[in-house]
Image: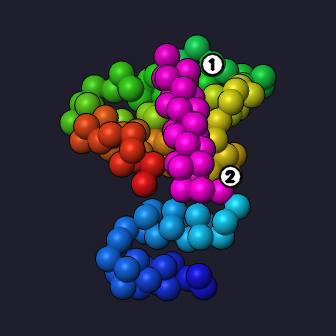
Amino acid sequence: MESLNDAVARAVEAGCSLGELALREEAAEGLRTRAELEAGLGRALGVMRGAVARGLPGDLHSVSGLVGGDAARLNRLTGPLSGTLFTDVLANALAVQEVNAAMGVIVASPTAGGAGVLPGVLLGLAGRGNIADAQLIR
C-alpha cells in the first residue's frame, strides 16, 4: 500500500475494516497464519494491559527521577474532565510511558517514544465500551 488513502480505499472495496485488511494481507504473505498473527497480537495486547496496570499506581520513576507519578495524578483528577474517556486514555498512555521510562516491558508500537498512544486509546475505549479482546486485536 502506498498511503493510508489507498488502504482505506482497499478496505472499503473489500467491505472490511483496516485492521481486517491488514490481517488478511499479512496472512497472505505466508510467513504466519492468521491464527499465529492473532495470537501474537493477543500477546502484545496482554503486555499493553500489563504496562498500564503497572504504571497507573504511580510508584514507578525513571532513573533520573524526572518521570513518574503523572499517570496516577491524572487518574485521581477531580473536575469536569475526571472520570471521562479522555482522562482514561491520557492516564493509560502516561502509565505506559512511565513504565518505559522505568525500563519496564512495553510494546514499542509504533515506537518506544510513542508507546503509550496505542494502549491508551485501545484500553481506554475497551474499558468504556466493554470491547472484547478479539475485537481489539482486529
Label for residue 60? Answer: 1
Position of 116 compared to 88: left or right?
right
- Verify whether residue 54 appears in magenta: yes
Whole-percent x and y of residue 128? 26, 38
Q: Residue at x 46, y 35 (%)?
A: 92
Whole-percent x and y of residue 30? 67, 66
Label for residue 117? Answer: none
Q: Residue furthest left?
A: 80
Mark 1 Cα-neighbour bin, 10 Å: few <14, some 14–19, many ≥20: many
Give the amino acid type for the residue marked by disc 1 in the picture: Leu
Q: Residue furthest right?
A: 63
Magenta segment's dominant SS is helix
Position of the N terminus by quadrant = bottom right
Give the amino acid type for the residue marked by disc 2 in the picture: Thr
Q: Residue at x 64, y 28 (%)?
A: 99
Whole-percent x and y of residue 74? 41, 29
- Asked whether the beta carbons under mark 1 and mark 2 sit within 8 Å of each other, the answer is no
Magenta stretch, residue numbers: 32-57
Pick whichever of labels 1 and 2 is earlier in the sequence.
1
Q: Residue at x 36, y 85 (%)?
A: 13
Describe the element under mark 1 as helix, strand or loop.
loop
Describe the element under mark 2 as helix, strand or loop.
loop
Q: Residue at x 60, y 85 (%)?
A: 2
Q: Which residue is mark 2?
A: 111
| Cα separation between marks 1 and 2 | 20 Å
Q: Is residue 70 visible?
A: no
Position of the C terminus by quadrant = bottom left
How many numbered badges does the structure rendering display?
A: 2
Q: 45 and 109: which one is in front?
A: 45
Query: Residue 89, located in which quarter of the rendered image?
Result: top left
